[in-house]
């Protein structure tokens, strides 16, 4: 999606260790008009798919998913919550997610009553790199018995294995910008 | 706002200790059509105000604020981030927020470059009870030198002191539903 690539080139900041900072429009300050364009593009890419619900993960996915939902007939958005609580009441799907950026593992939960067996969902998130967050969400989807119609990503780091692995497993992964390489010294960012 | 009160009556769950669970439409599963109505109502209530930016706090505020922003000419949304990192580089406004619900204090940050001195903001959030989160955001606003044009809240617990205190300090607080009392035994919820 040209608007997103242009914006990443213009405002993205490349840091050592393959870090791409896009907090000025995507995940701290939020450009809602851009979110709306992204939602329209995902709606085009997933046209014809049944979408009962949109699944995402806190925090950066929430705003993107909620604005995008307006392009999916206001499908309800469910966001997986990060938690530290040891709630073992069985009312929640739980999975462990490793964050390479933050160097730690955290647990996310989704209340069981918010994913109904047989319903069709798309998963939306801001970033795809190693694919850890998505694998966690997919585990929850499998346990819940929902049909994953597709995965929409704002920015995929194409030089990391997450996207390739998910596509090999048969998922329709629609990344609006795929970064093929970036250079922390020059600030240059290339797209696939 | 009648639609929100009706929805709270229908789907809200009252628990001991003045806990009102609204996770089936407001802050875990998100009813985006309702968010849109809420945004339209805040736009009406804050009509004529200059709104350069919308400030909120992760996580539950983000979706609400991003959808509401579409009713404020797509004003950018900045959300305060909860953090555990000890970043002392001076590039962030920081404040401590006490959570009565969770029984602990956490720190939130806003990058300084995302709040510009003299700009006009409204603050949006899902809940107002003791007012701790809002007081934290207001401290950040004061430090940043931004003008707070108003505070929009989905659900205010009118029997707790946060709203009264903010209004006494001169803020225009627009709560779309003000709960005046609730009963964990009967499940009854009254509105002001």
Image (cartoon, coloured by chain):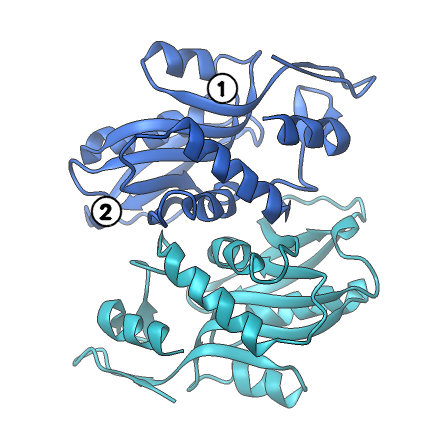
Chain colours: A cyan, B blue
Left or right, residue A66 beside residue B25: left
Tell me which chain the residue with mark 2 is part of.
Answer: B
Task: Please tell me whether mark 2 sits on a helix, a strand or a loop.
Answer: loop
Measured in 3D between alpha carbons, the distance from the residue under mark 2 to the one under mark 1, in whole angstroms, is: 29 Å
Q: Earlier in the sequence, mark 2 or mark 1?
A: 2
- Label 1 sits on residue: B130
Confirm whether residue B120 shows in the render.
yes
Task: Please tell me whether mark 1 sits on a helix, a strand or a loop.
Answer: loop
Q: Residues within 10 Å of mark 2 (few under 14, many from 20)?
A: few
Q: Position of residue A7 (x, y in %)?
A: 29, 70
Left or right, residue A123 beside residue B11: left
Confirm whether residue A99 shows in the render.
no
Res. A44 mark: none
Left or right, residue A149 beside residue B71: right
Of B40 and B164, nearer the camera is: B40
Query: Quarter holding the N terminus of chain A?
Result: bottom left
- Label 2 sits on residue: B88
Q: Looking at the image, is B6 positioned above or below residue B112? A: above
Task: Identify the residue shown where x is 70% and y is 32%.
Answer: B7
Q: Quadrant of residue B145?
A: top left
């Amino acid at each position: 999606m040209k608007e997103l690539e242009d914006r990443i080139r213009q405002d993205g900041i490349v840091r050592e260790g393959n870090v791409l900072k896009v907090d000025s429009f995507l995940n701290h300050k939020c450009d809602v008009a851009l979110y709306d364009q992204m939602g329209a593009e995902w709606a085009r890419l997933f046209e014809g798919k049944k979408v009962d619900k949109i699944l995402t993960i806190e925090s950066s996915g929430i705003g993107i998913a909620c604005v995008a939902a307006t392009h999916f007939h206001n499908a309800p958005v469910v966001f997986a919550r990060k938690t530290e609580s040891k709630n073992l009441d069985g009312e929640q799907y739980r999975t462990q997610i490793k964050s390479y950026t933050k160097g730690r593992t955290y647990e996310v939960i989704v209340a069981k009553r918010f994913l109904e067996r047989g319903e069709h969902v798309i998963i939306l998130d801001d970033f795809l790199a190693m694919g850890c967050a998505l694998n966690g969400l997919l585990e929850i989807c499998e346990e819940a018995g929902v049909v994953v119609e597709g995965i929409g990503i704002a920015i995929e780091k194409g030089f990391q294995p997450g996207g390739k692995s998910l596509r090999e497993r048969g998922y329709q992964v629609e990344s609006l910008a795929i970064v093929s390489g970036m250079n922390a010294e020059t600030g240059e960012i290339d797209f696939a």
